[in-house]
């Protein structure tokens, strides 16, 4: 190997390559999730309207929508383009874990990054076009900045803190949980140190940034928040949504709307997140277990990290509304804890047996992560028995979409077919069929004026009503959109789709 | 600088290779397109290796601010350059309605494999006479499988990024601001109306970003390439620097410039002449008593190895001599082998709307930019800065010439020269006039210079609702209808800029009259013949051979003004195609005038 090649950080490159491979290979293998459909649809609205109109009742920040809009405009409306921003951010999160070498050393950062790279949750939700990976990236960056200010006091850490804080605010309303936890962790550590002093106790470094730096960073952060929330200054009224969102979020968070996990409730304690860790995320569970030891006098920075991690876990456990993707915002501090403990074990601060045992358990847990990650992401990605597979669209959706998309690809006139979709919950169809210009969507209580359409989609309950209203010959097919939803029926008009079904007899004869 | 040089080398070499290969293999094909792109990549790689690292001064607050504003404006303009809104195909800028239609036509026409040198797609019996470089680059992408609209967005964003960097390298923050916020006094109307809009839209000195950068695809290459060349010449010939980019790349960029923008080529050529003259007669060269004596001494200077400037002079001469032939070929091609009329004429009042000299109107148009430029030109008489004299005086001469002579049929096209004059003069305005002032005075002058342009820019980019170019469903129906007709076939139809066949890249007898006229094409007779045929005054049997058309495309909205040569299109269709070929085979002396059967164009359900 030449001198220049030798200096390359091969281990870091290996971890990032592994992370990229797990996130990018067969990225379009699973159909778009309900939320991805909604997010893609919002990005489509940006194209149509010329700006993003922030809706506080949607209670998610605008950043991800801008990224999806950009990706779709550059690469087209397809699953790869929809998911690429989230994948890129998920990879950046792994990279940001590697940056903790500045604070905890290279080995700790590598173990943490490896755990994140192969984490079933981080990979599964990193391959979804949702906001969660952004929150992971910005919260890791926030911690990196905070620790940097604490230990070195340099200007770059201050700027990182501003970027992270504004990024979190632009991502999701849950930023209050994270930023609040960061501050509370500081307070708790301060109190704890009064009782059990840290060892070593890292003093706060001399400030190396100026008031001008503070003003510049603050102004840039405020500008970014105003810029994105106001729809690039085209919708200033939307800025009130910055605080109005909390009313909506509070309502949804408490109401839960079917997303509470009562099966995991023991008295006031909800162990849903810990149960998920036990099922999929052994390195994080190990880290959580090991973080208990920081109650005893230990490194102040790791104590802070452990307090923060446990604080976030408790906060998310207290909120009744629980969706499994939030787990990736909870588990990442425990990867750093695990890394620190592994390195400490190697340094033989504990007995040889304990050290060996710890390393063995960690290796097993990471190997298990790899196995679970591959199984979940490449084989069981729509299996509703997997708790991470949540409100996931089934591959059967292709019964409806494949004829439409394939026919339109061959002959663009098919983009202008008339279609009626009569489902109470129809996402991700509006995004998947977003290039089609004449599709009507109807909720249960609504119905179209007539059923004279090239294709009609309805729930099986409504079959009689639909078939009595059809006035032509139709091919009839059934499919399931997702778990906990009634089976759906789609009718394709014979004269429009004859070439697709290649002369198969129509199953429904309408009443002309 | 390496990125800029490599990207421009890629564009330029790809286009040059595509033209050469298309001549050899009768048009673009996937193998030709990929080969051209490979040539571009190789040129880019060599450019990367041979470009000298150039240490630009570290950007400061105003630099960052201007570059950020430029980036945001570019993202806004090019991410929405053309987009779908349900069934509608829209553009953000009304300036782009006609221009973008023509670009779509050219891109798709070239991508369809038209034999080189192509015939004009908008006028029968004429060679293509247009700087096709930028569109050809997009055609290469299209042939390689990139969607047309996506290709336009990519090229727009890439060109904007290169332009932003090149502008900053040439003129710093002030140079970027001069391009973004050029304007006169019209925008101050916002203080009365409190309604932000493009107040300069109807004026001669429109906002350059909106009226030229977004619409003229060729500028996406010509601006960064031209500014890079100016920057390189300035460093090399006046600041004693090494060559930033190698001579072969300078030659490539300069000689291929006509393929992208002829006006930029003219301007650069004149500046090059000015550089040469400055090197000959500038400071550091022994003084001669008269101009005649100075000219007579030129050969001696070139021979003299002791002359400090002998090497740069020889270099400049070599450069011009080497570029002459390829540049001439480029010009020959884009003028359709000199088939277009230049339209050069004396028109001393066009710049103020042909209403006679009116100083107030001039100031209203150009604001403070004009008096400041005049002051600078005079100030340089007393300032011995050879570099500033060379660039400012050359740019001023071109500005003055463009004010009194019109080069093309459409006089506003002169703005393509005036744009360069302004970009070249602006940094020297800053350096010589504004920078030495105290901050409050400097700030006040900047506000007066740029306020109107900034208002126009914001107003122009806030066209939230877009402008409709076409209906997707109608385009899909026409696309399906003509799918079985060979790409080389020419159609007769109404001359609208957004006729579906034009948007689909098909050849038509006569395109939009505004394009035909402004491109200097000799179209009048054919245009009249087409219109008479469409209204039934002349039979298609006699006109079709003269117009070189085989099919007639009539839309329902063309009726009843135009008369179909048979049954009318079905009412529920978008229009119909009429096959004119049976008429062409008919005996010309036959009195019969058969009724043609329409082939309906619509959605079949």
Image: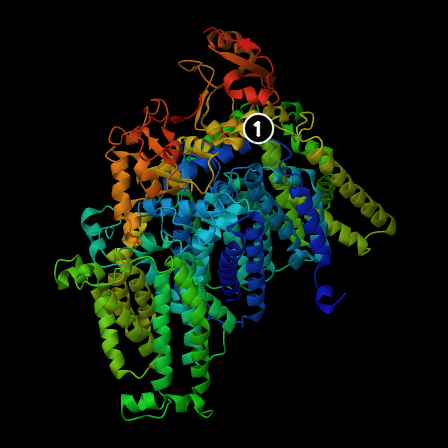
Residue A187 can be seen, yes or no? no
| Vertical comparison of A140 with A318: above or below | below
Q: Nearer the viewer, residue A296 or A173?
A: A173
Residue A466 % position (x, y): 49, 10
Residue B406 % position (x, y): 24, 62
User: Residue lying furthest front in this view?
Assistant: B589
Residue B371 % position (x, y): 21, 69
B131 sits left or right of A73 in the view: left
A242 sits left or right of B462 in the view: right
Chain under numbered label 1: A
Q: Nearer the viewer, residue B540 or A419?
A: B540
| Vertical comparison of B601 with B281: above or below | above
SS class, disc 1 = loop
Residue B546 % position (x, y): 33, 43
The residue where tag 1 is placed is A320
Q: Residue at x 35, y 76 (%)?
A: B273
| Vertical comparison of B456 with B396: above or below | above
B422 sits left or right of B50 in the view: left
| Crowdedness near tag 1: few (<14), some (14–19) or many (≥20) residues, C-alpha within 10 Å | some
Q: Quadrant of the C terminus of chain B?
A: top left
């Amino acid at each position: 190997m030449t001198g220049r090649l030798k200096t390359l950080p091969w281990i870091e490159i290996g971890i990032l390559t592994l992370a990229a491979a797990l996130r990018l290979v067969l990225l379009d293998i699973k159909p778009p999730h309900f939320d991805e459909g909604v997010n893609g649809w919002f990005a489509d609205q940006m194209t149509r309207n010329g700006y993003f109109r922030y809706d506080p009742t949607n209670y998610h920040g605008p950043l991800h929508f801008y990224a999806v809009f950009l990706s779709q405009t550059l690469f087209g409306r397809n699953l790869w383009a929809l998911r690429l921003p989230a994948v890129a951010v998920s990879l950046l999160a792994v990279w940001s874990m590697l940056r903790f070498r500045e604070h905890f050393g290279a080995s700790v950062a590598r173990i943490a990054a490896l755990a994140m790279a192969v984490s079933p949750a981080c990979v599964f939700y990193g391959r979804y076009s949702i906001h969660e990976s952004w929150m992971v990236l910005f919260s890791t960056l926030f911690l990196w900045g905070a620790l940097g200010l604490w230990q070195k006091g340099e200007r770059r850490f201050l700027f990182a803190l501003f970027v992270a804080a504004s990024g979190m605010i632009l991502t999701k309303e849950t930023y209050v949980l994270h930023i609040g936890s960061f501050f509370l962790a500081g307070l708790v550590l301060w109190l704890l140190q009064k009782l059990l002093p840290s060892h070593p106790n890292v003093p706060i470094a001399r400030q190396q940034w100026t008031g001008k730096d503070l003003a510049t960073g603050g102004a840039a952060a405020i500008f970014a928040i105003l810029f994105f929330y106001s729809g690039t200054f085209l919708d200033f009224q939307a800025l009130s949504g910055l605080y109005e969102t909390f009313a909506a979020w509070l309502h949804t968070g408490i109401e839960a709307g079917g997303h509470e996990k009562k099966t995991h409730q023991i008295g006031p304690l909800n162990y849903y997140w810990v149960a998920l860790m036990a099922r999929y995320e052994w390195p994080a569970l190990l880290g959580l277990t090991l973080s208990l030891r920081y109650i005893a006098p230990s490194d102040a920075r790791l104590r802070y990290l452990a307090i923060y991690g446990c604080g976030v876990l408790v906060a998310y456990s207290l909120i009744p509304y629980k969706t499994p993707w939030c787990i990736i915002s909870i588990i990442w501090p425990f990867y750093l804890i695990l890394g620190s403990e592994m390195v400490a074990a190697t340094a033989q601060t504990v007995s040889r047996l304990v050290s060996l045992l710890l390393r063995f358990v960690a290796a097993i847990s990471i190997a298990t992560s790899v196995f679970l990650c591959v199984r979940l992401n490449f084989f069981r990605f729509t299996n509703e028995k997997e708790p991470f597979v949540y409100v996931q669209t089934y591959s059967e959706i292709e019964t409806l979409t494949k004829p439409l998309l394939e026919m339109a690809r061959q002959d663009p006139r098919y983009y202008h077919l008339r279609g009626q979709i009569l489902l109470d919950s129809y996402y991700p169809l509006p995004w998947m069929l977003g290039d089609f210009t004449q599709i009507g969507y109807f909720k249960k209580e609504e119905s179209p004026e007539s059923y004279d359409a090239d294709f009609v989609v309805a729930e099986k309950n409504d079959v009689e009503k639909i078939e009595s209203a059809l006035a032509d010959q139709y091919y009839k097919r059934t499919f399931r959109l997702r778990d906990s939803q009634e089976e759906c029926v789609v009718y394709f008009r014979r004269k429009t789709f004859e070439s697709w079904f290649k002369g198969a007899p129509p199953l429904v004869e309408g009443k002309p | 600088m390496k990125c800029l040089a490599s990207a421009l080398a890629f564009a330029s070499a790809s286009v040059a290779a595509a033209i050469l290969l298309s001549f050899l293999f009768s048009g673009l094909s996937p193998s030709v397109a990929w080969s051209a792109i490979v040539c571009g990549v190789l040129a880019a790689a060599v450019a990367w290796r041979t470009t000298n690292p150039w240490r630009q001064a570290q950007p400061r607050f105003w630099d960052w601010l201007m570059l950020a504003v430029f980036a945001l404006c570019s993202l806004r303009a090019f991410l929405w350059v053309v987009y779908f809104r349900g069934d509608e195909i829209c553009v953000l800028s009304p300036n782009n309605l006609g221009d973008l239609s023509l670009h779509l036509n050219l891109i798709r026409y070239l991508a369809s494999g038209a034999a080189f040198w192509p015939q004009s797609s908008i006028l029968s019996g004429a060679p293509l006479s247009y700087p096709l470089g930028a569109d050809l680059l997009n055609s290469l992408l299209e042939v390689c499988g990139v969607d047309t609209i996506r290709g336009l967005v990519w090229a727009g964003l890439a060109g904007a990024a290169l332009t932003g960097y090149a502008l900053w390298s040439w003129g710093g923050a002030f140079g970027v601001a001069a391009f973004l916020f050029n304007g006169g006094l019209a925008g101050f109307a916002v203080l009365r109306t409190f309604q932000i809009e493009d107040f300069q839209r109807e004026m001669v000195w429109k906002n350059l970003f909106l009226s030229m950068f977004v619409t003229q695809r060729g500028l996406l290459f010509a601006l960064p390439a031209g500014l890079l060349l100016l920057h390189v010449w300035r460093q090399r010939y006046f600041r004693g620097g090494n060559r930033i980019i190698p001579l072969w790349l300078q030659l490539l960029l300069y000689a291929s410039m006509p393929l992208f923008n002829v006006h930029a080529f003219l301007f650069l050529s004149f500046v090059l002449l000015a550089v040469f003259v400055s090197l000959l007669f500038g400071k550091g060269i022994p003084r001669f008593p008269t101009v005649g004596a100075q000219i007579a001494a030129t050969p001696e200077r070139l021979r003299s190895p002791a002359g400090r400037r002998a090497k740069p002079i020889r270099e400049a001469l070599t450069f011009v001599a080497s570029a002459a032939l390829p540049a001439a070929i480029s010009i020959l091609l884009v003028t359709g082998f000199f088939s277009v009329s230049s339209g050069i004429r004396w028109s001393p009042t066009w710049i103020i709307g042909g209403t006679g000299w009116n100083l107030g109107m001039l100031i209203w148009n150009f604001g403070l930019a004009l008096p400041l430029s005049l002051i600078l030109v005079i100030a340089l008489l007393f300032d011995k800065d050879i570099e500033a004299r060379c660039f400012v005086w050359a740019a001023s001469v071109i500005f003055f010439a463009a004010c009194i002579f019109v080069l093309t049929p459409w006089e506003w096209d002169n703005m393509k020269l005036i744009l360069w004059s302004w970009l070249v003069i602006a940094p020297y305005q800053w350096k010589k006039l504004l920078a030495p002032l105290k901050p409050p005075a400097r700030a006040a002058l900047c506000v007066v210079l740029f306020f109107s342009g900034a208002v126009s820019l914001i107003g122009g980019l806030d066209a939230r609702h877009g402008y409709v170019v076409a209906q997707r469903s109608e385009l899909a129906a026409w696309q399906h209808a003509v799918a079985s007709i060979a790409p080389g076939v020419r159609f007769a139809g109404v001359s609208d800029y957004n006729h579906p066949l034009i948007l689909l890249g098909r050849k038509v007898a006569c395109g939009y009259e505004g394009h035909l006229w402004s491109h200097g094409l000799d179209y009048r007779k054919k245009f009249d013949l087409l219109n008479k045929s469409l209204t039934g005054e002349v039979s298609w049997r006699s006109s079709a051979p003269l117009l070189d058309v085989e099919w007639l495309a009539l839309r329902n909205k063309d009726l009843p003004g135009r008369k179909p040569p048979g049954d009318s299109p079905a009412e529920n269709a978008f229009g119909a195609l009429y096959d004119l070929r049976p008429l062409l085979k008919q005996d010309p002396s036959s009195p019969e005038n058969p009724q043609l059967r329409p082939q309906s164009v619509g959605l079949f359900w």
